[in-house]
Image (spheres, rainbow, N blue to C red):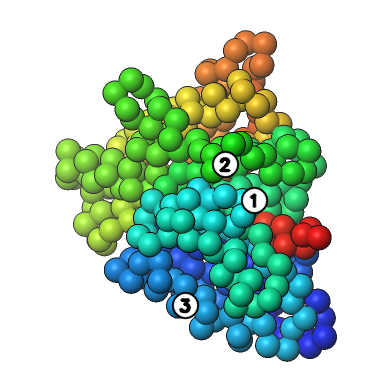
Amino acid sequence: MNQRRRGVSDYLAIEVGGTKLQLMAGDASGAIHERRRFSVDRTLGAQGIRDQIQQALPALIQDREIRGIGVGFGGPVNWKTGAIARSHQIEGWSGFELGAWLRRLTSLPVRVENDANVAAFGEARAGAGRGCDPVFYITLGSGVGGGLVVGGKIYHGAVPGEAEIGHIRLDRSGATVESRCSGWAVDARVRAIAAKDPGGRLAALVRSGSGSEARHLLPALDQGDPGAQRILREAADDLALGLSHVTHLFHPEIIILGGGLSSLGEPLRSAVESALAGCVMEVFAPGPRVALAGLGEDAVPAGALILAGEMP
């Protein structure tokens, strides 16, 4: 529900990605009261995104008693200082003191985290991982990221490293989880299969639109298309191999699948869970439960709101 609430304490959440920017007002439980969503123009770089943030903030702050800001940033950050290490998609972020900049704009306390960490935190506290410990979250979108929550807190490695599952290698040639399971990687697989079988249902769906070819997988799977089934099986096997390393190192109680590719739903979830069972040591079988994100596209902002609510 979108509403203005004069005199009621709220928090702000900011999600900075490579294709979208979201700003939301809500409470410390992760409930969202008002939202703003913008597309990102990559040609304008980081400055273009900062301009969008600066223009949108006043309307969200007006008539609200804002107590803090939580930020989920799409790339490695120094969570202790709020400085950005880099963005892999947008130029102009490296070294930028995002936390300090937002504090100057708003005079509010700010905490900046990697977006997958924030999503993991949201899912652990208010989503599919509620009541589980540890919780591992993997986002399958324009890139592949991960977040780990242990004992109700985000796990941090040495700065600026985090749970970067997308960069785990799957073989010695350099193939990574991201190069096999990101949205753009699956798009490429769909195009390749469609080209080999131009008479198939998947190829027909691809011809009906341009770009984001992975979105055609679910309807093709529903119709029993062999090419779509092969892509699902290969992606699930690659994901399971990457997640087996997470399982052997951290033994999460639950693994949560989020991001755009998770819209494949139960076919992806069950395929990954089944493949993972075959990749872990027998003593750990069947491995952690695999679930779909409960908060969907709101995982990052909900987590950022909860994070902001826990700042001193």
Q: Which mark is residue 125?
A: none
Expressed as whole percent of the image width and height from the top left, the position of residue 71 reads 60, 62
Residue 253 appears anywhere in the view: yes
| Residue picked out by circle 2 | 159
| Local SS, label 1 | loop
Determine which residue is flagged by label 3.
52
Mark 1 crowd level (few <14, some 14–19, many ≥20, 10 Å Cα)? few
Contact, mark 1 vs mark 2 (Cβ under 8 Å): yes
| Mark before the other along the chain sequence, 3 or 1 | 3
Amino acid bearing label 3: Gln
State left or right for residue 150 relative to residue 219.
right
Can you say whether 260 is above or below 66 in the image? Answer: above
Residue at screen point 82% across, 86% down: 7
- As displayed, is residue 39 above or below residue 255? below
Q: At x 28% / y 40%, what residue is drawn?
A: 189
- In front of the other: 37 or 238: 37
Q: Which mark is residue 80?
A: 1
Q: CA distance from mark 3 to mark 1?
A: 25 Å
* Observer-nearest of 260 and 220: 260
Three-letter amino acid code at disc 1? Lys
Disc 2 to disc 3: CB gap under 8 Å:
no
Amino acid at circle 2? Val
The disc, 1 or 2, on the residue closer to the chain's N-terminal end is 1
Dot 2 falls on a residue whose secondary structure is loop
x, y percentage for residue 164?
51, 38
Mark 2: few, some, or many residues within 10 Å (few <14, many ≥20)? Answer: few
Crowd class of label 3 (few under 14; some 14 to 19; many from 20; radius 10 Å) = some
80 lies above or below 228: below
Residue at 23% across, 46% down? 191
